[in-house]
Protein backbone atom coordinates (compact mmCIF):
# COMPACT_ATOMS: atom_id res chain seq x y z
CA UNK A 1 0.00 0.00 0.00
CA UNK A 2 2.82 2.42 0.87
CA UNK A 3 4.53 1.74 -2.45
CA UNK A 4 1.23 2.39 -4.28
CA UNK A 5 0.82 5.77 -2.55
CA UNK A 6 4.38 6.70 -3.46
CA UNK A 7 3.70 5.75 -7.09
CA UNK A 8 0.58 7.96 -7.14
CA UNK A 9 2.54 10.92 -5.74
CA UNK A 10 5.32 10.42 -8.30
CA UNK A 11 2.78 10.39 -11.15
CA UNK A 12 1.11 13.56 -9.84
CA UNK A 13 4.50 15.26 -9.51
CA UNK A 14 5.39 14.20 -13.03
CA UNK A 15 2.15 15.67 -14.38
CA UNK A 16 2.75 18.89 -12.46
CA UNK A 17 6.31 19.21 -13.83
CA UNK A 18 4.99 18.56 -17.34
CA UNK A 19 2.38 21.30 -16.82
CA UNK A 20 5.04 23.75 -15.60
CA UNK A 21 7.21 23.02 -18.66
CA UNK A 22 4.22 23.59 -20.93
CA UNK A 23 3.37 26.92 -19.25
CA UNK A 24 7.01 28.06 -19.40
CA UNK A 25 7.19 27.19 -23.10
CA UNK A 26 4.02 29.16 -23.86
CA UNK A 27 5.35 32.17 -21.95
CA UNK A 28 8.68 32.06 -23.82
CA UNK A 29 7.00 31.76 -27.22
CA UNK A 30 4.61 34.58 -26.39
CA UNK A 31 7.52 36.76 -25.26
CA UNK A 32 9.35 36.11 -28.50
CA UNK A 33 6.26 36.96 -30.51
CA UNK A 34 5.82 40.25 -28.67
CA UNK A 35 9.46 41.35 -28.59
CA UNK A 36 10.53 40.30 -32.08
CA UNK A 37 8.59 40.58 -35.35
CA UNK A 38 7.82 37.30 -37.06
CA UNK A 39 8.77 36.64 -40.68
CA UNK A 40 5.86 37.49 -42.94
CA UNK A 41 4.08 39.67 -40.39
CA UNK A 42 3.38 43.30 -41.22
CA UNK A 43 1.07 44.10 -38.30
CA UNK A 44 3.58 46.56 -36.85
CA UNK A 45 4.11 48.37 -40.15
CA UNK A 46 2.08 51.55 -40.53
CA UNK A 47 1.39 53.24 -43.85
CA UNK A 48 2.41 56.89 -43.46
CA UNK A 49 1.49 58.02 -46.98
CA UNK A 50 0.41 56.71 -50.37
CA UNK A 51 1.66 58.39 -53.54
CA UNK A 52 0.37 58.44 -57.12
CA UNK A 53 2.53 57.83 -60.19
CA UNK A 54 3.84 61.41 -60.37
CA UNK A 55 5.49 61.15 -56.93
CA UNK A 56 7.78 58.09 -57.00
CA UNK A 57 9.76 57.94 -53.74
CA UNK A 58 13.54 57.73 -53.57
CA UNK A 59 15.07 58.22 -50.12
CA UNK A 60 13.69 59.83 -46.97
CA UNK A 61 15.14 62.30 -44.43
CA UNK A 62 13.55 63.45 -41.17
CA UNK A 63 14.50 66.76 -39.58
CA UNK A 64 14.74 67.29 -35.81
CA UNK A 65 11.38 69.06 -36.00
CA UNK A 66 9.79 66.04 -37.68
CA UNK A 67 9.60 67.34 -41.25
CA UNK A 68 9.62 64.54 -43.84
CA UNK A 69 11.83 65.33 -46.82
CA UNK A 70 11.80 62.84 -49.71
CA UNK A 71 13.74 62.57 -52.95
CA UNK A 72 11.78 61.46 -56.00
CA UNK A 73 13.25 58.68 -58.08
CA UNK A 74 14.33 59.82 -61.51
CA UNK A 75 14.01 56.30 -62.96
CA UNK A 76 10.35 57.30 -63.28
CA UNK A 77 11.13 60.75 -64.73
CA UNK A 78 9.56 62.78 -61.91
CA UNK A 79 9.69 66.54 -62.65
CA UNK A 80 10.45 67.44 -59.01
CA UNK A 81 13.70 66.17 -57.51
CA UNK A 82 12.91 66.62 -53.80
CA UNK A 83 9.61 67.15 -51.99
CA UNK A 84 8.25 67.57 -48.47
CA UNK A 85 5.53 65.20 -47.28
CA UNK A 86 2.96 66.71 -44.91
CA UNK A 87 0.87 64.94 -42.26
CA UNK A 88 -1.87 64.21 -44.82
CA UNK A 89 0.55 62.64 -47.28
CA UNK A 90 0.49 65.61 -49.66
CA UNK A 91 3.75 66.75 -51.25
CA UNK A 92 5.21 70.17 -52.03
CA UNK A 93 8.53 71.04 -53.71
CA UNK A 94 11.49 71.17 -51.32
CA UNK A 95 13.01 73.57 -50.51
CA UNK A 96 11.05 75.37 -53.23
CA UNK A 97 10.04 74.76 -56.83
CA UNK A 98 13.13 76.43 -58.32
CA UNK A 99 15.62 74.35 -56.37
CA UNK A 100 13.56 71.16 -56.77
CA UNK A 101 13.55 71.46 -60.56
CA UNK A 102 16.17 71.02 -63.29
CA UNK A 103 18.96 73.65 -62.94
CA UNK A 104 18.18 76.98 -64.61
CA UNK A 105 20.58 79.23 -66.52
CA UNK A 106 22.06 80.42 -63.22
CA UNK A 107 22.73 76.88 -62.04
CA UNK A 108 20.01 76.95 -59.40
CA UNK A 109 18.27 73.60 -59.23
CA UNK A 110 18.97 69.87 -58.97
CA UNK A 111 19.75 67.26 -61.62
CA UNK A 112 18.99 63.95 -59.93
CA UNK A 113 18.85 63.40 -56.18
CA UNK A 114 18.61 60.04 -54.45
CA UNK A 115 20.57 60.30 -51.21
CA UNK A 116 19.59 62.95 -48.70
CA UNK A 117 20.02 63.26 -44.92
CA UNK A 118 19.07 65.71 -42.21
CA UNK A 119 21.60 66.47 -39.49
CA UNK A 120 20.84 67.35 -35.86
CA UNK A 121 20.93 71.08 -36.71
CA UNK A 122 18.13 70.80 -39.25
CA UNK A 123 20.40 71.04 -42.30
CA UNK A 124 19.19 68.76 -45.12
CA UNK A 125 22.10 67.53 -47.24
CA UNK A 126 21.07 66.52 -50.78
CA UNK A 127 23.39 64.54 -53.04
CA UNK A 128 22.98 65.66 -56.65
CA UNK A 129 24.30 63.53 -59.47
CA UNK A 130 26.32 64.88 -62.39
CA UNK A 131 24.31 66.11 -65.37
CA UNK A 132 26.59 64.31 -67.80
CA UNK A 133 30.11 63.19 -68.63
CA UNK A 134 32.68 65.73 -67.50
CA UNK A 135 30.21 67.63 -65.34
CA UNK A 136 30.56 67.75 -61.55
CA UNK A 137 28.14 66.37 -59.03
CA UNK A 138 27.36 68.40 -55.95
CA UNK A 139 26.05 68.43 -52.40
CA UNK A 140 23.37 71.02 -51.74
CA UNK A 141 22.66 71.80 -48.07
CA UNK A 142 19.47 73.60 -47.05
CA UNK A 143 18.86 75.13 -43.62
CA UNK A 144 15.30 74.15 -42.62
CA UNK A 145 15.37 76.42 -39.56
CA UNK A 146 16.21 79.71 -41.30
CA UNK A 147 14.84 78.50 -44.67
CA UNK A 148 17.90 79.44 -46.68
CA UNK A 149 20.68 77.88 -48.71
CA UNK A 150 23.39 76.73 -46.33
CA UNK A 151 26.12 75.42 -48.60
CA UNK A 152 27.02 73.94 -51.98
CA UNK A 153 29.99 71.60 -52.40
CA UNK A 154 31.00 70.55 -55.93
CA UNK A 155 32.35 67.07 -56.68
CA UNK A 156 34.33 67.13 -59.96
CA UNK A 157 36.38 64.43 -61.66
CA UNK A 158 38.49 62.56 -60.63
CA UNK A 159 36.66 62.64 -57.27
CA UNK A 160 33.69 61.19 -59.14
CA UNK A 161 34.06 58.46 -61.75
CA UNK A 162 33.96 59.02 -65.51
CA UNK A 163 30.44 57.59 -65.43
CA UNK A 164 29.40 58.52 -61.90
CA UNK A 165 26.29 57.49 -60.03
CA UNK A 166 26.32 59.41 -56.76
CA UNK A 167 23.95 57.31 -54.73
CA UNK A 168 23.78 57.84 -50.98
CA UNK A 169 25.53 59.66 -48.14
CA UNK A 170 26.10 59.71 -44.39
CA UNK A 171 26.71 62.89 -42.39
CA UNK A 172 29.28 63.00 -39.56
CA UNK A 173 29.18 66.29 -37.66
CA UNK A 174 31.54 65.02 -34.96
CA UNK A 175 34.32 65.00 -37.56
CA UNK A 176 32.79 67.54 -39.97
CA UNK A 177 32.71 65.01 -42.79
CA UNK A 178 30.34 63.42 -45.27
CA UNK A 179 30.77 59.91 -46.67
CA UNK A 180 29.31 59.11 -50.10
CA UNK A 181 28.82 56.01 -52.24
CA UNK A 182 29.59 56.43 -55.93
CA UNK A 183 28.11 53.32 -57.54
CA UNK A 184 29.64 54.30 -60.90
CA UNK A 185 29.75 51.43 -63.42
CA UNK A 186 30.45 48.68 -60.89
CA UNK A 187 34.12 47.72 -60.91
CA UNK A 188 35.04 51.36 -60.25
CA UNK A 189 32.55 51.77 -57.38
CA UNK A 190 34.03 53.72 -54.47
CA UNK A 191 33.46 55.80 -51.38
CA UNK A 192 34.03 59.56 -51.32
CA UNK A 193 35.14 61.36 -48.16
CA UNK A 194 34.27 65.06 -47.97
CA UNK A 195 35.94 67.38 -45.45
CA UNK A 196 33.29 69.94 -44.47
CA UNK A 197 35.92 72.25 -42.97
CA UNK A 198 37.69 72.76 -46.29
CA UNK A 199 35.41 71.24 -48.95
CA UNK A 200 38.32 68.98 -49.97
CA UNK A 201 37.20 65.52 -51.14
CA UNK A 202 38.96 62.17 -51.63
CA UNK A 203 37.94 59.06 -53.56
CA UNK A 204 38.77 55.89 -51.61
CA UNK A 205 38.33 52.11 -51.84
CA UNK A 206 37.67 52.27 -55.58
CA UNK A 207 37.35 48.75 -56.95
CA UNK A 208 37.79 47.26 -53.49
CA UNK A 209 36.02 43.96 -52.83
CA UNK A 210 33.80 45.84 -50.35
CA UNK A 211 32.54 48.26 -53.02
CA UNK A 212 32.39 46.08 -56.17
CA UNK A 213 29.24 44.10 -57.02
CA UNK A 214 29.28 40.32 -56.76
CA UNK A 215 28.38 38.17 -59.77
CA UNK A 216 24.91 37.25 -58.54
CA UNK A 217 21.57 37.73 -60.31
CA UNK A 218 19.01 40.19 -59.01
CA UNK A 219 15.78 38.19 -59.12
CA UNK A 220 12.57 39.93 -58.02
CA UNK A 221 9.13 38.39 -58.36
CA UNK A 222 10.69 35.54 -60.34
CA UNK A 223 12.21 37.91 -62.93
CA UNK A 224 15.93 38.61 -63.43
CA UNK A 225 16.32 42.39 -63.34
CA UNK A 226 18.31 43.93 -66.19
CA UNK A 227 19.95 47.33 -66.61
CA UNK A 228 20.95 48.59 -70.07
CA UNK A 229 20.16 45.16 -71.46
CA UNK A 230 22.44 43.28 -69.07
CA UNK A 231 21.70 41.52 -65.76
CA UNK A 232 21.80 44.25 -63.11
CA UNK A 233 24.89 44.10 -60.91
CA UNK A 234 25.19 47.22 -58.77
CA UNK A 235 28.15 48.25 -56.64
CA UNK A 236 28.46 50.45 -53.54
CA UNK A 237 25.05 51.86 -52.74
CA UNK A 238 23.66 51.88 -49.17
CA UNK A 239 25.67 53.72 -46.51
CA UNK A 240 25.00 54.83 -42.95
CA UNK A 241 26.85 55.85 -39.79
CA UNK A 242 26.26 54.82 -36.18
CA UNK A 243 24.87 57.36 -33.64
CA UNK A 244 28.34 57.83 -32.09
CA UNK A 245 29.92 58.58 -35.48
CA UNK A 246 32.49 55.84 -34.95
CA UNK A 247 31.60 53.38 -37.73
CA UNK A 248 30.48 53.77 -41.32
CA UNK A 249 28.45 50.81 -42.64
CA UNK A 250 28.12 50.24 -46.38
CA UNK A 251 27.75 47.56 -49.03
CA UNK A 252 27.38 46.84 -52.72
CA UNK A 253 23.71 46.52 -53.59
CA UNK A 254 24.55 43.31 -55.48
CA UNK A 255 26.34 41.56 -52.66
CA UNK A 256 25.95 39.13 -49.80
CA UNK A 257 28.19 40.98 -47.33
CA UNK A 258 27.72 44.07 -45.18
CA UNK A 259 30.92 45.98 -44.38
CA UNK A 260 32.02 48.64 -41.94
CA UNK A 261 35.07 50.82 -41.43
CA UNK A 262 35.91 53.23 -38.63
CA UNK A 263 35.57 56.94 -39.28
CA UNK A 264 39.07 57.31 -37.81
CA UNK A 265 40.49 55.20 -40.63
CA UNK A 266 38.39 56.81 -43.36
CA UNK A 267 39.63 60.24 -42.28
CA UNK A 268 43.29 59.19 -42.07
CA UNK A 269 44.86 60.57 -45.26
CA UNK A 270 48.19 58.92 -44.44
CA UNK A 271 46.85 55.40 -45.05
CA UNK A 272 47.71 53.84 -48.40
CA UNK A 273 45.04 52.19 -50.54
CA UNK A 274 46.16 48.77 -49.32
CA UNK A 275 46.29 49.87 -45.68
CA UNK A 276 42.81 51.37 -45.83
CA UNK A 277 41.41 48.25 -47.50
CA UNK A 278 42.91 46.13 -44.71
CA UNK A 279 40.95 48.17 -42.15
CA UNK A 280 37.58 47.25 -43.73
CA UNK A 281 35.63 44.72 -41.66
CA UNK A 282 33.02 42.29 -42.93
CA UNK A 283 30.16 42.94 -40.51
CA UNK A 284 27.72 40.23 -41.53
CA UNK A 285 25.51 38.56 -44.09
CA UNK A 286 22.90 40.39 -46.12
CA UNK A 287 20.62 39.96 -49.14
CA UNK A 288 20.65 42.21 -52.20
CA UNK A 289 19.53 45.53 -50.76
CA UNK A 290 19.07 49.23 -51.47
CA UNK A 291 18.98 51.14 -48.15
CA UNK A 292 20.33 50.70 -44.63
CA UNK A 293 20.29 52.44 -41.26
CA UNK A 294 21.71 51.50 -37.85
CA UNK A 295 20.65 51.85 -34.22
CA UNK A 296 22.73 52.36 -31.08
CA UNK A 297 23.19 48.64 -30.49
CA UNK A 298 24.69 47.91 -33.89
CA UNK A 299 21.53 46.51 -35.48
CA UNK A 300 21.74 47.38 -39.17
CA UNK A 301 18.32 47.49 -40.83
CA UNK A 302 18.19 46.36 -44.45
CA UNK A 303 15.77 46.99 -47.30
CA UNK A 304 15.81 43.50 -48.82
CA UNK A 305 14.64 44.16 -52.37
CA UNK A 306 14.76 40.61 -53.75
CA UNK A 307 12.58 39.37 -50.87
CA UNK A 308 10.07 42.27 -50.81
CA UNK A 309 11.11 42.59 -47.21
CA UNK A 310 12.81 44.48 -44.40
CA UNK A 311 15.50 42.69 -42.42
CA UNK A 312 18.21 43.32 -39.86
CA UNK A 313 21.83 42.32 -39.30
CA UNK A 314 22.56 42.12 -35.58
CA UNK A 315 25.89 42.88 -33.93
CA UNK A 316 26.85 39.22 -34.26
CA UNK A 317 26.61 39.47 -38.04
CA UNK A 318 23.45 37.37 -38.28
CA UNK A 319 20.75 38.42 -40.72
CA UNK A 320 17.04 37.78 -40.27
CA UNK A 321 13.85 38.99 -41.91
CA UNK A 322 11.64 41.29 -39.86
CA UNK A 323 8.75 41.92 -42.27
CA UNK A 324 7.78 40.55 -45.66
CA UNK A 325 4.93 41.48 -47.99
CA UNK A 326 4.98 41.17 -51.78
CA UNK A 327 2.79 44.25 -52.33
CA UNK A 328 3.35 46.58 -49.38
CA UNK A 329 7.14 46.09 -49.42
CA UNK A 330 7.78 45.90 -53.16
CA UNK A 331 11.36 47.28 -53.45
CA UNK A 332 11.88 48.89 -50.07
CA UNK A 333 14.29 51.75 -50.71
CA UNK A 334 15.53 54.46 -48.29
CA UNK A 335 15.39 54.51 -44.47
CA UNK A 336 15.49 57.16 -41.73
CA UNK A 337 14.97 57.25 -37.95
CA UNK A 338 12.34 59.49 -36.32
CA UNK A 339 12.57 60.94 -32.79
CA UNK A 340 10.06 58.37 -31.46
CA UNK A 341 12.31 55.48 -32.59
CA UNK A 342 10.37 54.52 -35.66
CA UNK A 343 12.15 53.79 -38.92
CA UNK A 344 10.54 55.30 -42.01
CA UNK A 345 10.95 53.41 -45.29
CA UNK A 346 10.13 54.41 -48.85
CA UNK A 347 8.71 51.72 -51.14
CA UNK A 348 9.39 52.42 -54.81
CA UNK A 349 8.55 49.31 -56.92
CA UNK A 350 11.76 50.19 -58.73
CA UNK A 351 11.89 46.82 -60.49
CA UNK A 352 8.88 48.06 -62.48
CA UNK A 353 10.55 51.31 -63.62
CA UNK A 354 11.63 51.61 -67.29
CA UNK A 355 15.43 51.36 -66.73
CA UNK A 356 15.00 48.07 -64.85
CA UNK A 357 12.06 46.71 -66.84
CA UNK A 358 13.14 46.72 -70.49
CA UNK A 359 11.83 50.25 -71.05
CA UNK A 360 8.34 49.52 -69.71
CA UNK A 361 6.69 51.32 -66.77
CA UNK A 362 4.66 48.69 -64.96
CA UNK A 363 4.16 50.64 -61.74
CA UNK A 364 1.01 49.63 -59.87
CA UNK A 365 -0.52 52.43 -57.78
CA UNK A 366 0.21 53.45 -55.13
CA UNK A 367 3.77 53.99 -53.95
CA UNK A 368 4.13 53.79 -50.15
CA UNK A 369 5.91 55.48 -47.31
CA UNK A 370 5.77 53.18 -44.27
CA UNK A 371 7.22 53.03 -40.78
CA UNK A 372 7.95 50.35 -38.18
CA UNK A 373 9.29 50.36 -34.59
CA UNK A 374 13.05 50.01 -34.28
CA UNK A 375 14.45 47.28 -32.05
CA UNK A 376 16.48 49.94 -30.21
CA UNK A 377 16.86 53.70 -30.52
CA UNK A 378 18.91 55.46 -33.15
CA UNK A 379 19.51 59.06 -34.17
CA UNK A 380 16.86 61.18 -35.89
CA UNK A 381 17.31 61.37 -39.65
CA UNK A 382 20.07 58.76 -39.77
Image (spheres, helix red, strand yellow):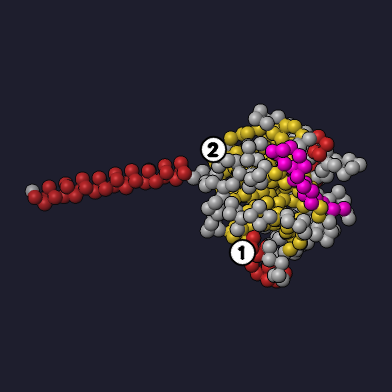
Q: Which residues are magenta?
A: 135-153
Q: Secondary structure at mark 1?
A: strand
At x 59%, y 51%, the residue is 243
Q: Mark 2 = which residue?
A: 44
Please state the horizontal and vertical placement of residue 342, each as a whole percent of the image.
57, 41
Q: Most extreme residue toward the right, as rendered?
A: 105
Q: Which image quadrant is residue 122 in?
A: top right
- In this rendering, is residue 268 above or below 359? below
Badge 2: few (under 14), some or many (20 or more) residues near its Cα, within 10 Å?
Answer: few
Marks 2 and 1: CB-CB under 8 Å? no
At x 69%, y 46%, the residue is 117
Main SS of the magenta part reads: strand
At x 16%, y 46%, the residue is 8
Q: Earlier in the sequence, mark 2 or mark 1?
A: 2
Per the image, is 292 magenta?
A: no
- In this rendering, is residue 116 above or below 204? above
Please state the horizontal and vertical placement of residue 290, each as a whole percent of the image.
68, 49
Residue 378 seen in the current view: yes
Q: Mark 1 = which residue?
A: 281
Give the foreground label among 2 and 1.
Answer: 1
Residue 351 seen in the current view: no
Q: Which image quadrant is residue 155 in?
A: bottom right
At x 86%, y 48%, the residue is 131
- In this rendering, is residue 219 above or below 55? below
Q: Secondary structure at mark 2?
A: loop
Badge 1: few (under 14), some or many (20 or more) residues near its Cα, within 10 Å?
Answer: some
Please state the horizontal and vertical placement of residue 214, each as a whole percent of the image.
70, 60
Amino acid sequence: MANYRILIKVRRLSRFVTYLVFVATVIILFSLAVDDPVVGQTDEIEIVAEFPAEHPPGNIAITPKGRLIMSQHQFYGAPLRVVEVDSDGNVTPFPNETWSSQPNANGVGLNTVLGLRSDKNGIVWMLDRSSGEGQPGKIVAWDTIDEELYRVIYLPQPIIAKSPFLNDLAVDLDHNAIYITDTASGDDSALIVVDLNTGFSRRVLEGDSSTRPEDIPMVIDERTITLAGEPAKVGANPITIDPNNEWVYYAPMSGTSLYRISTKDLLDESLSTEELSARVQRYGDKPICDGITVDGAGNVYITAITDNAIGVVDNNGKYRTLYQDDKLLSWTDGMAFSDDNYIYVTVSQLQNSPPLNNGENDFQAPFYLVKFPALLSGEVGR
